[in-house]
Image: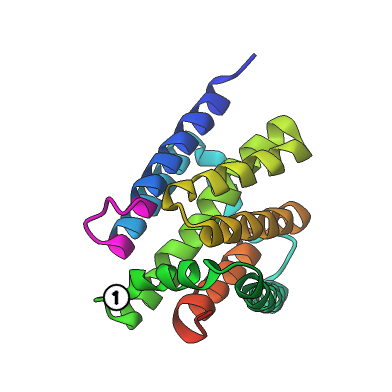
């Protein structure tokens, strides 16, 4: 029997896919601001749906702050290195790869890069981990076990399909799997947040992959 909590998780996840699809389909009043508002609303919906679970999620875990910072930075560096190599391989193999990767960075046009960095650090990066891993994956994994990790990665990837950008969709799938496995292994949302934020800032602000 599907219980009320799981039904809420499914409905909120579907709402997330719709909101992300609007973003990546270009139906926005401002990509970064709308992204921030969307993920904030999703986190609020997650909290209202699962107050006890979300409160427990952000409490200190068995992983202390210093190890979380260290492994968060290390994992972000590993992920960035992987994407750097992947970009070189993709551009060598596929003629469309460079243009698709470059098109992602047009999202920063006409907006101050410092503002983008602040949104990534304080809203988007933390919000994505809290919602997709801390709420969606945690609840789906509780019901389906390891299969729940696969389902959460599929949902995260599906949220990017409306972009029609194969490189972005592939990146979402790889990142989703990477952070989902990390959350499954360490059960520390803070480790995931640090990794996601550092990777976001590195890729979009400091060392763009173009």
Q: Single out the residue that lies furthest toward the bottom.
A: 206
- Residue 59 visible, this angle: no
Q: Quadrant of residue 205?
A: bottom left
When asked about the image quadrant of residue 67, the answer is bottom right
Residue at which label 1 appears: 109
Picture residue at 41% right of the left edge, 73% below the top: 105
* Residue 184 in the image: above or below residue 112: above
Q: Which residues are magenta?
A: 23-33
Q: Looking at the image, which is closer to me, 79 or 168?
A: 168
How is the model colour-coded? Answer: rainbow
Give the position of the N terminus as an image quadrant.
top right
Q: Residue at x 43, y 62 (%)?
A: 124
Q: Is residue 151 left or right of residue 24?
A: right
Q: Position of residue 146 (x, y in %)?
A: 77, 40
Q: Out of 75 and 53, give the one closest to the viewer.
A: 75
Q: Residue at x 37, y 69 (%)?
A: 119
**Residue shown at the point (41%, 64%) measured from the top left:** 123
State the residue lying farthest toward the top.
1
Q: Is residue 76 above or below residue 142?
A: below
């Amino acid at each position: 029997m599907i219980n009320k909590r799981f039904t809420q998780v499914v409905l909120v996840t579907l709402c997330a896919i719709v909101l992300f699809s609007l973003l990546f389909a270009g139906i926005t009043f401002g990509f970064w601001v709308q992204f921030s508002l969307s993920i904030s609303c999703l986190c609020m919906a997650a909290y209202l749906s699962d107050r006890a679970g979300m409160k427990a999620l952000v409490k200190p875990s068995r992983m202390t702050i210093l190890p979380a910072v260290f492994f968060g930075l290390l994992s972000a560096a590993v992920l960035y290195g992987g994407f750097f190599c992947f970009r070189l391989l993709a551009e060598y193999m596929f003629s469309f790869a460079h243009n698709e990767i470059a098109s992602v960075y047009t999202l920063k046009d006409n907006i101050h890069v410092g503002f983008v960095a602040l949104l990534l650090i304080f809203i988007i990066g933390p919000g994505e981990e809290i919602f997709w891993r801390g709420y969606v994956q945690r609840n789906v994994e509780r019901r389906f076990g390891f299969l729940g990790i696969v389902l959460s990665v599929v949902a995260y990837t599906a949220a990017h399909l409306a972009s029609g950008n194969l490189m972005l969709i592939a990146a979402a799938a790889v990142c989703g799997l990477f952070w989902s496995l990390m959350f499954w292994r360490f059960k520390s949302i803070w480790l995931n947040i640090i990794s996601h934020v550092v990777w976001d800032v590195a890729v979009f602000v400091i060392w763009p992959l173009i």
